[in-house]
RNA sequence: GGAGAGUUGGCUGAGCGGUCGAAAGCGGCGGUCUUGAAAACCGUUGUAGUGAAAGCUACCUGGGGUUCGAAUCCCUAACUCUCCGCCA
């Protein structure tokens, strides 16, 4: 949620910033509404003051044997005016809110405008692996190794799903445990949140109202509930409607959850195997930071996410996304993209983002400034750390051997019970 | 799923239709005393909107209602607890 005062005071800046995200918005109507909102508040508060005073005088007047009925009449008259203005005010605030809550976050100033084509690779780690034999893609390798079962998954669930089995399940679990142990070492707090969340949580994270159709909704629940598309949704709501102490920031959390996504119609033919599915595993990191330290938090998250991929010995790159390619709620996003040999492209395994105060404003997540003692909105940041569904194929393909076996990356061996090679 | 009880400020907890944004205690902050600390004593201490400010307005879980007037009465939702049923 953008600050309505910013919209009112600097509409040109807001307009220009949103243009970089590909949004051409007309703010003139909203500005009028913001002004009439203030007028209405002043009017209605004055009337309420008058009414309160009259009502409070009743016992006194009664004691002195004065005319109470004329007070009752006056207050009734005031009440009908107040009711009318209150209605108007509510309407006005609804209109402002309905519009402003659909607006994306303002991108950081240093971002290039535009979409994907303006993303900039800012770092490349390792080199594309060279094979002196004919390579296979991860779907073929996994099926031959018997570590992923696509067809039985289709039978028991449907398309866009898969089954990890045997060493495949162990490799998947090893990855997750490896991430967990790294985050624990860095002093992050481990959270296992519920996977079923209420509407408010999706709203605060910025997924709703715009992306309601991208998540799975539970049918027989009242009020409506959805299954989380990422642990970020849960983590970023942990401190909703709370006031934190500046000394406790940054708060650093991580969570493991599967992620459930509809992504209706987005399944592309080249995205075979587990590149895109309805459910995938992810470990997610979230920081609650102050305005001052949010940049440092961002750098830390980028560093942490890259180091995980680097320690796995995978070839990858880090991209700074153009404004239009950043997520809706985010002011800044860096993607960590791992090389998938069979596709010949880099695929996102981690998205590191800073929402600034966008989510915090929606969720009234504040902290008390030590010096001024005033409350301020937190900055929320999130980063995958990491999504396994892209790493798994990358590992299988980058670590494949001529005989179809796959070498287990060194850092995962301890989490695999010492197994160093996956063979059929 | 059935029956009942509850939800008040950072916490504990009073309030049961009028001056209650809310007693009291704890905690926090400032001060007195002290070489320093503790204790004691004094003062202060919610959030948000609006206004240049004084102030005003709203908020006692959320929403609706009754009333001139609601933390207090009624309805409703969410949540918590207890008992029963079912179940990992």
Image (spheres, coloured by chain):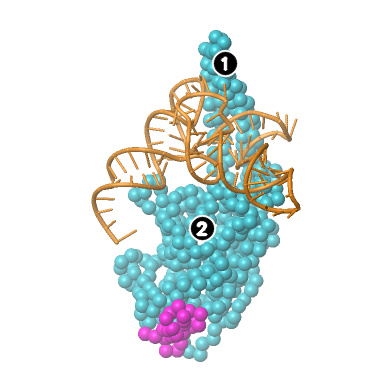
Chain colours: A cyan, B orange
Whether residue A117 is visible to the viewer of this picture, yes or no, is: no
Q: Residue at x 53, y 78 (%)?
A: A312
Of residues A45 and A95, the one nearer the viewer is: A45
Mark 1, secondary structure of its residue: helix
- Residue A162 image point, x, y percent: 38, 70
Report the disc number at residue A60.
1
Tell me the quarter of the image containing the C terminus of chain A: bottom left
The answer to whether A91 is drawn above or below residue A324 in the figure is above
Query: Is residue A411 in the magenta section?
Result: yes
Classify residue A49 by image quadrant: top right
Q: Residues within 10 Å of mark 1 (few under 14, many from 20)?
A: few
Q: Dot 2: what SS?
A: helix
Disc 2 designates what residue?
A: A235
| Mark 2 vs mark 1: in front | 1
**Mark number for residue A3?**
none
The image position of residue B88, as x and y in percent, is 29, 61
At a point 46% along the width and 87% down the height, the residue shown is A401
- Tag 1 subunit: A
Q: Position of residue A289 (x, y in %)?
A: 62, 57
**Residue bounds of the magenta highlight:** A397-424
Q: Looking at the image, which residue is at 54% across and 80% down?
A: A313
Above or below, comparing residue A397 to residue A378 in the picture: below
The answer to which image quadrant residue A113 occupies is bottom right
């Amino acid at each position: 949620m953008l600050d309505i005062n910013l919209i009112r005071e600097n509409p040109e800046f807001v307009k220009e910033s949103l243009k970089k995200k590909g949004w051409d918005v007309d703010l003139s109507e909203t500005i009028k509404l913001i002004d009439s909102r203030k007028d209405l508040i002043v009017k209605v508060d004055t009337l309420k003051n008058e009414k309160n005073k009259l009502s409070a005088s009743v016992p006194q007047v009664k004691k002195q044997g004065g005319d109470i009925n004329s007070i009752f009449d006056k207050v009734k008259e005031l009440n009908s005016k107040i009711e009318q203005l209150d209605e108007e005010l509510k309407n006005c605030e609804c209109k402002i809110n309905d519009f402003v809550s659909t607006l994306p976050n303002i991108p950081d100033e240093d971002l290039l405008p535009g979409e994907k084509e303006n993303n900039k690779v800012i770092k490349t780690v390792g080199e594309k692996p060279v094979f002196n034999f004919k390579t296979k893609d991860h779907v073929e390798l996994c099926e031959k190794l018997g570590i992923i079962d696509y067809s039985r998954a289709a039978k028991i669930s449907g398309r866009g799903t898969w089954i990890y089995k045997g060493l495949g399940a162990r490799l998947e679990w090893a990855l997750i445990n490896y991430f967990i142990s790294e985050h624990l070492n860095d002093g992050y707090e481990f959270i296992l949140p519920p996977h079923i969340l209420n509407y408010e949580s999706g709203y605060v994270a910025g997924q709703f109202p715009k992306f309601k159709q991208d998540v799975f909704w539970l049918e027989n629940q009242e009020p409506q509930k959805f299954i989380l598309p990422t642990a970020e949704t849960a983590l970023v709501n942990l401190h909703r409607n709370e006031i934190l102490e500046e000394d406790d920031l940054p708060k650093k959390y991580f969570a493991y959850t599967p992620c459930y996504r509809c992504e209706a119609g987005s399944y592309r033919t080249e995205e075979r195997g587990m590149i895109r599915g309805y459910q995938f595993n992810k470990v997610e990191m979230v920081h609650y930071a102050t305005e001052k330290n949010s940049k440092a938090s961002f750098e830390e998250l980028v560093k942490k996410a890259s180091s995980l991929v680097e320690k796995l010995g995978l070839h990858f790159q880090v991209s700074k996304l153009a404004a239009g390619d950043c997520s809706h709620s985010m002011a800044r996003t860096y993607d960590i993209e791992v090389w998938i040999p069979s596709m010949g492209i880099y695929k996102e395994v981690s998205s590191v983002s800073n929402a600034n105060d966008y989510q915090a404003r929606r969720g009234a997540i504040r902290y008390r400034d030590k010096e001024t003692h005033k409350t301020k909105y937190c900055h929320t940041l999130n980063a995958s750390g990491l999504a396994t569904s892209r790493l798994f194929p990358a590992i299988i393909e980058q670590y494949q051997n001529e005989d179809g076996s796959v070498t287990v990356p060194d850092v995962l061996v301890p989490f695999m019970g010492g197994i160093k090679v996956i063979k059929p």
